Every structure is written in C-alpha cells, then in structure tokens.
Image (tube, rainbow, N blue to C red):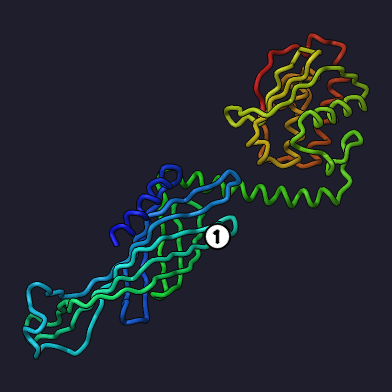
Amino acid sequence: MKKYIISIFLCLYFTISYSQFGVGIGYEVSGNSDYNSALKVNLENLSFNNNNKGFIIGLDLGMNFIQGNMTGYIGLNEYPEDATGEYLNTVFTPALKLGFQLTRSLYITGSGGMNFLKEYKDFNAKGSIGKYSVATGNKNSSPYYRVGLSSVRGSLSPNIGFGSNGFYAGATFYFGNASNKIKRVYNTKIAQADAKKKLKELKKSKIEIAGYKISNLNIYDLESLVRVFLADCNDHGIQIKSSISATFQNLNDNTIALALGGNNDSKIEIKVDPILWKNSSIEKKMYTLYHELGHDVLNLDHGEGGKMMFNYSEMEYSWDNFFEDKEYMFSFYLDNRLNEESFKRTPKDNI
C-alpha cells in the first residue's frame, strides 16, 4: 500500500517539475452502502506539448468518515444490547488520474485505483451517548475506477464523473500563471481553428497578388513571399534588384516582423517571429510583410504611405484592407520617389 502511494507521488513530482500544478476538491455520492459517500481531494498537473495539446496527470484521494467512532474506548462486544445489527464501512481510495484534451476546453479524464474498506459495527445506546460505532477488524478491498469530463478555460476547472463508487462532482484550481497559459492556449486554438476555416474558404476563392494565387502560397517560405512583393512592385513599375535574407527569429515586445535593410538598396533583410507568425491569419501575415518591406524595399517611414505604414497594427485585417492599403502605399511611393531624401530613415522595429 505505502509503496503504491509513494510510486504515484514520485511520478507526480517529476511531472510537476515541468507542469502547472492544481489542487481540487469534490464529492462522490454512492448508492452502494459499502462505500457510502466520500470526500475527494486531487493533486494534478496540466501540461501542454509543443502543439499546445493538453494532458493531465495526478493523484486522487477519497475518504469518508463514521460518526461517533468509539474504537479503542468501547469494546466491540462490551454492550451487545446497544447493537443495531447494522454494519458500516469507511473507505480510503487512492487512484491515479489521467486526462487528455478533446476540444479547445474539454478534457476526458479517467481515474484508476483501489478501495480500501474498514468495517464498523453500528450501535445505538440509550441516553446521552446515542449512536456510535466500533471497528470490527474486518478489512476488504476492491478496484476503483471513474470516467469524467473537465472544462478547462482558466484557473478554475469544474469536473464531473461516474464510476465504481457512484457520481462525482468537483473542481480543480490551477496555481501560478496557469490561467494566462490556459487562456493563451485556448485563444490560440480558436485562432488556429479560424485560420483553418479561412484557409478552406481561401482555396475556394481566386484571390491573387501579382499573379500569385494566395491559396498556393507557402506561408512558411519567407523568401518566396518577399518575391511576391517584388513581383507586385514590378507590376507597379518599380524595379528592384536586391539580395534577399528572410528568416525566422524570436523577437521581443510582441513584434511579428522586423525590417533591417532600410536605405540599403543592395539587400533586403527581414526577421519574423515564428510563434506570432504561426498564430496570425494569412491576411495579417501579408499585411505585416508588406509593412516591413515598405520600410526595407521602398525606404518608407511611419507616416509615409498611408495606413499600411502606420506605427501600430490592428488585431486583424481583411483582404479589402490589404489591397486598398497596399495600392495607396505604392501610389505614394510613385508620386514621391523623385525626392529620394524624403525616404531616408533609421531602421526600427514595427508591427
């Protein structure tokens, strides 16, 4: 028994080192008189893999209590006239809990362990003592299992379940920065689902940029996306011949992309944050890239070129925003390109 519990705690300890920790409490109502109803406490961790897929591992502990336990004070056969003929049980239930993410916020959970029962004889004495119980020394054990569902959207997670010992209802509280992490993962999954939906819609559409179908673009091939911009420049009568360096790199302060080649007509250099890029829609990706290439290739500063060259980005863009704003940017450049001094600037981070 002790080895069983220790092994579970060791497993849980090493998991805690890399996961969010939570404590839960609940109540299990049983229709079986052997188990009665029990208070449940759980210690668990909520973890996420590299794909933001969540899983739970933890330890469940259940126990109930007998009113008026006089074991050690009154002998089992000391007052036979008080015996009611009924027998009660206390139950101690250690179990291992596992959970796996089904949807954005719904987890399926399962617990498996053992019921350790201790039998008590029921008595009812006349006078002030009233009902009491005394342990008989009989012990028993049986398998324990429970299947349930948990809703995880923030720090507090409600859960329900049903199993060998009856119906369960409870909640788990996750400590630390779990709430922000869970919400970020939850929102990321919403964004990813929306992106997949938009991609399906995009494949049905015939949106093109400079002859390139949007649905055929590889959004992780940054150099090819830069070449789309250059083809767009060419369509507007702007000839660009520069080497291209477009790579992914972790950036600071929620910066999606950064232009480093401004006022250097021989080189185009763009850095893109991989996480923010992955979680952005195709519309925002292209809008952001055109903004940075407006700096790098056209040498435009904030305030030059209309809304596409504005300092701050919006949460989201539409294709109408993209096409309207890029046309204004190109028109601005063509109308002002003779005055080259007006385009000199110092490279800076942007969206």
Residue marked by disc 1: 106
Left or right of residue 85: residue 281: right
- Which corner quadrant holds the C terminus? top right
Q: Is residue 51 above or below residue 219?
A: below
Q: Position of residue 321 (x, y in %)?
A: 78, 38
Residue at 81% across, 18% down: 243
Q: For the residue carrying disc 1, how many other residues have a C-alpha within 10 Å: few (<14), some (14-19), or many (20+)? A: some
Q: What amino acid type is highlighted by mark number 1?
A: Leu
Residue at far top of view: 341
- Which corner quadrant holds the N terminus? bottom left
Left or right of residue 10: residue 334: right
Q: Is residue 20 above or below residue 258?
A: below
State the image quarter where residue 33 is shown.
Answer: bottom left
Q: Number of marks in the image? A: 1
Residue at 20% across, 79% down: 120
Considering depth in this image, is 52 or 301 the residue closer to the camera? Answer: 52
Left or right of residue 93: residue 306: right
State the image quarter where residue 245 is shown.
Answer: top right
Q: Position of residue 268 (x, y in %)?
A: 77, 19
Q: Position of residue 17 (x, y in %)?
A: 41, 42
Q: Position of residue 347 (x, y in %)?
A: 68, 16
Left or right of residue 302: residue 10: left
Q: Is residue 143 above or below residue 83?
A: above
Residue at far front of view: 3
Considering depth in this image, is 271 or 99 the residue closer to the camera? Answer: 99
Q: Is residue 113 above or below residue 7?
A: below
Residue at 15% across, 74% down: 69
Residue at 74% across, 16% down: 262
* Label 1 element class: strand
